[in-house]
Amino acid sequence: MGNRQEPDHRQGQDDQKPADRFPGLDRFAAGANHIAGRLRPGSSGREYTVVDPATGQEVLTYELAGAADVDAAVAAAREALPGWAGATPAERSEAMHRFAAELDARAEELARAESLQCGKPLKLTREFDVPGTIDNTAFFAGAARHLQGQSAGEYSGDHTSYVRREPIGVVGSIAPWNYPLQMAAWKVLPAIAAGNTIVLKPAELTPLTSLLFAEAATAAGIPDGVVNIVTGAGREAGEHLVSHPDVAMTSFTGSTAVGKRVAELATATVKRLHLELGGKAPFVVFDDADLEAAVNGAVAGALINTGQDCTAATRAYVQRPLYEAFVSGVADLMAAVRLGDPFEAGTDLGPLISHAQRDRVAGFVDRARAYATVVTGGVAPHNAGAYYRPTLITGAAQDSEIVQAEIFGPVLVVLPFDSDEEGLALANDTPYGLAASAWTRDVYRAGRATREIKAGCVWVNDHIPIISEMPHGGYKASGFGKDMSSYSFEEYTQVKHVMFDNTAVARKDWHRTVFGDR
């Protein structure tokens, strides 16, 4: 099949300035750190400029946080810890319910700020990022009242035992740039619901909604110092936060390569560690699947957030009887996807986060031309934004770079398979294990796929949906630990065994093992 090029789509960029798209930029004039309830400037002596990836226009220039700012944020979190940890679950819950209401009242400005800094279409931020964050906040407001341990019991016969769940302390978290608002929520909410305080470092490219999130927490009455934001570079602010002796836990979401560095730093101070790392999600289509559903699911699952999603469908394995029709259907649907201005109603796909990321994605595709076929896409439109057309690739070998590496862009690779055993083996043939999907009408095939695919989430006849009540986390090089759901409390609490003697006997029977006889 030859290279199928879709028609050009009008990019729709207008003359609006960033302040027109999000009329609240002046609120960050005081700085890009939120420490002890107020904005503060950085002290690194180095400036950073947030750029609208859809237009290339400068959005906000601020001074990056340095080690001193991290120290101040950790000190604020440590000072707030006794009061917040000592609050009753009901008190924390009530504060977080107010937090959810505050976010709901600010939904439109959160959506516009997220679209501006990330290039996400407004329909994505309005219908996915922001509502998901509000729902997550409401979920943890309720979950804060259900931090339960094992039932009390006399397990030794002479003692009563029970289990307490206690906060770990000050949490130092690092969030990525692909879902800045949702990642801030995933880091902050389980931590504070469990009674911890937190210092969050968002990506330098995308600090706006993390700051708005913290501002909403303060407005909701969550005490100063419970939620702190420091916006600095990874090697300076991030590494100092992970290494800080007063930080008891680190949660990191990002690439596997950086996750290894975070783990190295955390290990030096024996911190609790939670890692949500890279992914290369397989999309397994069996020969009895609903072809139309699979085609629609593959395009949506591959292109959401312009493919900058660690759970995005990136490797489609299609059983041979459906292979040609699947490739043709995906190519046609990808060609119809509308690139454009994120703030225009007709836009389906926005730009990548930066021109550097666009060039990185293009590099993977360009290198693949030597050993595979680019069926559609594979080019960048000629405009000021960091756009890249939805790209479909076939003919690649299983061990090729385009199949094995995390590209983090709007690129889907399709490979055929014959037997069910082969399809499932190919799905597992990657270092990653974050998410996957299986497409079939056969309940037994579906059951086998969910058992045998090694991933933290396996969807059946869908790909991407997440809900607050269910955990998110990976196998293998995709990390360990869970975001969302009550399972996340396993990351953010210490489990303590408490044991009471019930005999009131001074000399216990076991003492004879140390002195005397029975």
Image: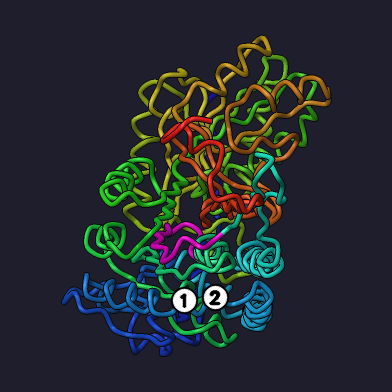
Report the residue that reaches farthest toward the front: 517
Q: Measuring 51% from the left and 84% from the top, which residue is drawn there?
A: 223
* Residue that mark 2 sits on: 86
Q: Residue 250 occupies which quadrant of the picture? A: bottom left
333 or 357, nearer to the observer: 357
Q: What numbered label is drawn on residue 443?
A: none
189 or 83, nearer to the observer: 83
Badge count:
2
The answer to whether marks 1 and 2 mark residues whose Cβ atoms lie closer than 8 Å is yes
370 or 52, nearer to the observer: 52
Judged left or right of residue 364, residue 135 is right
The magenta region covers 166-180
Judged left or right of residue 136, residue 481 is left
Q: Is residue 168 magenta?
A: yes
Q: Residue 65 occupies which quadrant of the picture? A: bottom left
The amino acid pointed to by label 1 is Pro
Q: Position of residue 343 (x, y in %)?
A: 57, 71
The amino acid pointed to by label 2 is Gly
Q: Quadrant of the N terminus?
A: top right
Q: Measuring 32% from the left and 49% from the top, which residue is drawn there?
A: 270
Q: Position of residue 175 (x, y in %)?
A: 43, 59
Report the residue that reaches farthest toward the left: 45
Q: Is residue 234 magenta?
A: no
Within-10-Å neighbours for mark 1: few <14, some 14–19, many 20+ = some
Q: Measuring 18% from the left and 73% from the top, which residue is drawn there?
A: 46
Q: Is residue 107 visible?
A: no
Rendered position, 194 above or below 499: below
* Residue that mark 1 sits on: 82
Within-10-Å neighbours for mark 2: few <14, some 14–19, many 20+ = few
